[in-house]
Image (cartoon, grey):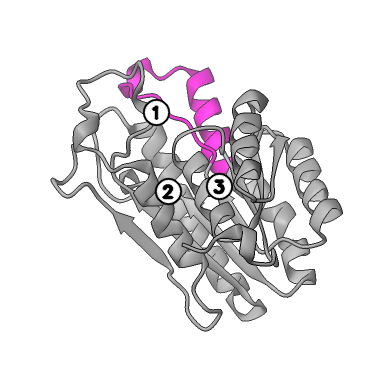
Amino acid sequence: MTNPTTTAITKTAIVTGAGRGIGSEIARVLAMRGFAVLAAARTVTELEDLCSDLREKGCIATPVRCDVRSPDDVRALIHACESEHGRLDVLVNNAGMGRILPVVETTDAIWRETVETNLSGTFYCTREALPLMLRTGGGVIVNMASIAAVRGFANFAAYSACKAGILAFSRSLREEVRKRGIRVTVVMPGATQSSFWAGQQGDWDPRRMIPAREVAEAVANAVCQPPSTSTDEIVIMPSGGPL
């Protein structure tokens, strides 16, 4: 891993949902590989702790409060990136949420929050980031889906629908922008150790899940490939299979 204290910062990354779990680890790994990172989430205190730790290690990391459900918040996030760094090289659409519930127990409010956070948030961030990326020579967009996008799991209907939407959105977007210097990677992890599972229905064993750091490393490896290469889709699963 590159030491950021000895490498000039040349590229900028935005990571949404960076306050905890996979997002926090992605922000950390990219910062340690030399990216200037804007870490975005709704909870500022978690972001401040993350960015303070990274700055102590010689990284460039900025916390930005952003609710990806709000187009205004997203526009402010992209504006902050442009104002501070003048460019955007990597966008990681990681912000997400989900409730493990039967369809009959999925209220209108839970459905709307799931769709707005996972699917609409990915769309809003991508839409606002594209003009800046195109002006500055292209980049990489990473959309975090889930193995639930392509495999059925009981009581995951709302979450699975959004993640399948992210997969379809990513495939279409890739064909739209690939000739303009923008690569699109969609990541489909299996069960990953994170706060997602706290309070959820079911008996979940984190010891059988993927460490969040391993998902983050896979994302960073895809992002850091040369421009001549594109990792279109990544499926990363617990070695023991789905839970």
Q: The disc labelled 2 sits on which kind of residue? A: Ala
Left-right relation of 13 to 206: right
Task: Give the SS element for disc 2.
Answer: loop
Q: The disc labelled 3 sits on which kind of residue? A: Ala
Q: Main secondary structure of the magenta part?
A: helix
- How many C-alpha atoms fall within 10 Å of the one at disc 1: few (<14), some, or many (≥20)? some
Magenta includes 104? yes
Which residues make up the magenta segment?
95-120
Residue 153 found in image quarter: top left
Q: The disc labelled 1 sits on which kind of residue? A: Phe
Residue 145, numbered circle: 2
Q: Earlier in the sequence, mark 1 or mark 3?
A: 3
Are the two marked residues, 1 and 3, in contact with CB atoms closer than 8 angstroms? no
Residue indicated by mark 3? 27
Rendered-image quadrant of the C terminus:
top left
Task: Give the SS element for disc 3.
Answer: helix
Q: Nearer the viewer, residue 122 or 110?
A: 122
Q: Nearer the viewer, residue 181 or 169?
A: 181
State the residue at coordinates (77%, 62%): 87
Q: Earlier in the sequence, mark 2 or mark 1?
A: 2
Residue 71: x %, y % from top left: 74, 39
- How many C-alpha atoms fall within 10 Å of the one at disc 3: few (<14), some, or many (≥20)? many
Mark 2 or 1, closer to the camera? 1
Residue 212: x %, y % from top left: 37, 42
Q: Nearer the viewer, residue 145 or 89?
A: 89
Magenta includes 154? no
Q: Nearer the viewer, residue 55 or 236?
A: 55
Residue 196, numbered circle: 1
